[in-house]
Image (cartoon, rainbow, N blue to C red):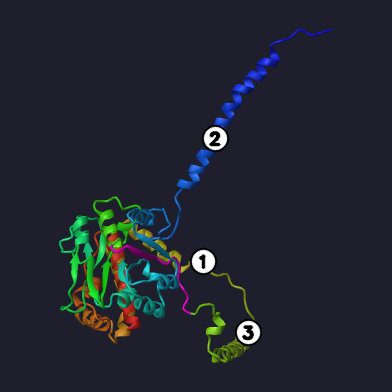
């Protein structure tokens, strides 16, 4: 017996033919959205990293330079810089606090080509721009007020709180812009440019006023640029282990010390008798104490007390190195420090005995300058 035809079969097939295109379209949309998310997601990295799209990276600036036809070579090590260096190349040095080896700095100082130092630490500035000295802090100067074409074309720029520089010799033909935050001079046929701030080059601040124009004018001054912002410290000893770096006598010294400690422990143990269990008080780590005091200062906006604590601690460590007592007058301390590091007595006195900071940024600058002075005195 033949069953009568019904409309159920054709209706299901019709619905599938219609719905499969909807499902396929949804899948395509999901795939495109996933790929777009992966491609446009921020790429984290260290500050001034040319590959980083985070706020303090420089991916945007490097991309703009390449769009303008500038060849940008991203160097990850001192050896990369040495291989790529040429006379027609500008070398951009950033994150110089990771350059801790004097031999590396000497190698970099001997390379051909112009230099652009971005917020250099004292060690790097002394090696790569030896004719410059720090001249205090420039507070939020925006106008160039100089004859440098790159700065005049950019106009006003938001550099923020920045270091300022002067020439080590009054005879040095030095061009100073933004109240000394940007300086340039010529040495041995190469042009050396130093800028005391780096934030204006980052992805986050590139759109502020003339920041993008200034950054591109400085970093794009040559058709070929080597961008060197080391992301980690390079060891001076290469692949040598810690044991390889120790003198042969160290092993005997350690053995003698271990034997002396063992004999002392036996003697004290026999003298004091058996150990007695005793409940110890709560031990608070020094780092937690420092962090707690810092939070208290910040919650009460006690920048004056925080700056006074930093200056007092620095002076307590500096005075013995300078051969001075705790009763030494500020003028004597200032002159002794300035003579030791070859700095300006006015700038040194302002750092050690100046007024209390008005903002958190000024407090951070004072801390950095105090650390810089203490390091220079220790290594002088």
Disc 1 to disc 3: CB gap under 8 Å: no
Q: Secondary structure at mark 1?
A: loop
Q: Nearer the viewer, residue 229 or 24?
A: 24
Q: Farthest right residue? A: 1
Residue at 40%, 73% in the rendered image: 99
For marks 3 and 2 on the same chain, the one whose residue lies earlier in the sequence: 2
Total numbered labels: 3
Q: Is residue 226 magenta?
A: yes
Q: CA distance from mark 2 to mark 1?
A: 61 Å
Q: Nearer the viewer, mark 3 or mark 2?
A: 2
Q: CA distance from mark 1 to mark 3?
A: 26 Å
Q: For residue 273, which numbered disc appears in the image?
A: 3
Q: Nearer the viewer, residue 308 or 5?
A: 5
- Residue 236 appears in the picture as rendered: yes
Q: Tell me which secondary structure the magenta stretch mostly adopts.
A: loop
Q: Secondary structure at mark 2?
A: helix
Q: Secondary structure at mark 3?
A: loop
Q: For residue 28, which numbered disc appears in the image?
A: 2
Disc 3 to disc 2: CB gap under 8 Å: no
Judge the density around disc 3: few (<14), some (14-19), many (≥20) Cα neighbours within 10 Å.
Answer: few
Judge the density around disc 2: few (<14), some (14-19), many (≥20) Cα neighbours within 10 Å.
Answer: few
Residue at 74%, 9% in the rendered image: 5
Q: For residue 282, which numbered disc appears in the image?
A: 1
315 relative position to 355: left or right: right
The answer to which quarter of the image holds residue 255 is bottom right
Q: CA distance from mark 3 to mark 2?
A: 81 Å
Q: Nearer the viewer, mark 2 or mark 1?
A: 2
Q: Which residues are magenta?
A: 221-236
- Residue 275: image x %, image y %? 63, 79
For marks 1 and 3 on the same chain, the one whose residue lies earlier in the sequence: 3
Q: For residue 107, which numbered disc appears in the image?
A: none
């Amino acid at each position: 017996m033949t069953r009568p035809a019904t409309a159920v079969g054709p209706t299901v097939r019709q619905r599938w033919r219609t719905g499969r295109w909807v499902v396929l379209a949804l899948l395509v949309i999901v795939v495109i959205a996933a790929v777009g998310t992966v491609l446009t997601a921020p790429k984290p990295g260290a500050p001034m990293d040319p590959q980083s799209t985070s706020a303090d990276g420089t991916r945007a600036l490097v991309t703009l330079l390449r769009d303008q036809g500038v060849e940008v070579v991203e160097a990850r090590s001192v050896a990369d810089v040495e291989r790529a260096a040429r006379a027609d190349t500008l070398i951009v040095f950033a994150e110089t606090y990771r350059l801790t080896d004097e031999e590396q700095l000497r190698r970099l100082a001997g390379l051909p080509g112009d230099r652009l130092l971005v917020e250099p630490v004292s060690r790097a500035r002394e090696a790569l721009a030896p004719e410059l000295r720090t001249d205090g802090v420039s507070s939020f100067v925006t106008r160039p007020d100089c004859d440098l074409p790159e700065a005049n074309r950019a106009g006003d720029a938001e550099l923020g709180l920045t270091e300022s520089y002067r020439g080590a010799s009054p005879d040095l033909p030095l061009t100073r812009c933004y109240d000394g935050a940007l300086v340039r001079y010529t040495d041995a046929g190469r042009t050396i440019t130093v800028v005391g701030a780096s934030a204006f080059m980052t992805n986050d601040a590139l759109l502020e006023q003339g920041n993008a124009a200034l950054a591109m004018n400085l970093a794009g001054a040559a058709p070929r640029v080597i961008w060197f912002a080391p992301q980690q410290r390079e060891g001076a000893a290469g692949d040598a282990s810690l044991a390889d770096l120790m003198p042969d006598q160290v092993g005997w010294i350690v053995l003698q010390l271990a034997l002396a400690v063992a004999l002392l422990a036996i003697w004290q143990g026999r003298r004091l008798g058996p150990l007695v269990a005793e409940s110890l008080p709560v031990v608070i780590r020094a780092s937690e104490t420092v962090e707690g005091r810092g939070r208290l200062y910040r919650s009460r906006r006690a920048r004056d007390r925080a700056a006074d604590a930093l200056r007092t601690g620095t002076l307590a460590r500096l005075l013995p190195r300078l051969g001075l007592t705790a009763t030494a007058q500020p003028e004597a301390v200032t002159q002794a420090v300035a003579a030791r590091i070859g700095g300006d007595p006015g700038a040194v006195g302002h750092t050690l005995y100046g007024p209390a900071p008005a903002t958190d940024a000024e407090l951070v600058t004072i801390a950095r300058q105090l650390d810089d002075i203490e390091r220079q005195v220790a290594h002088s």
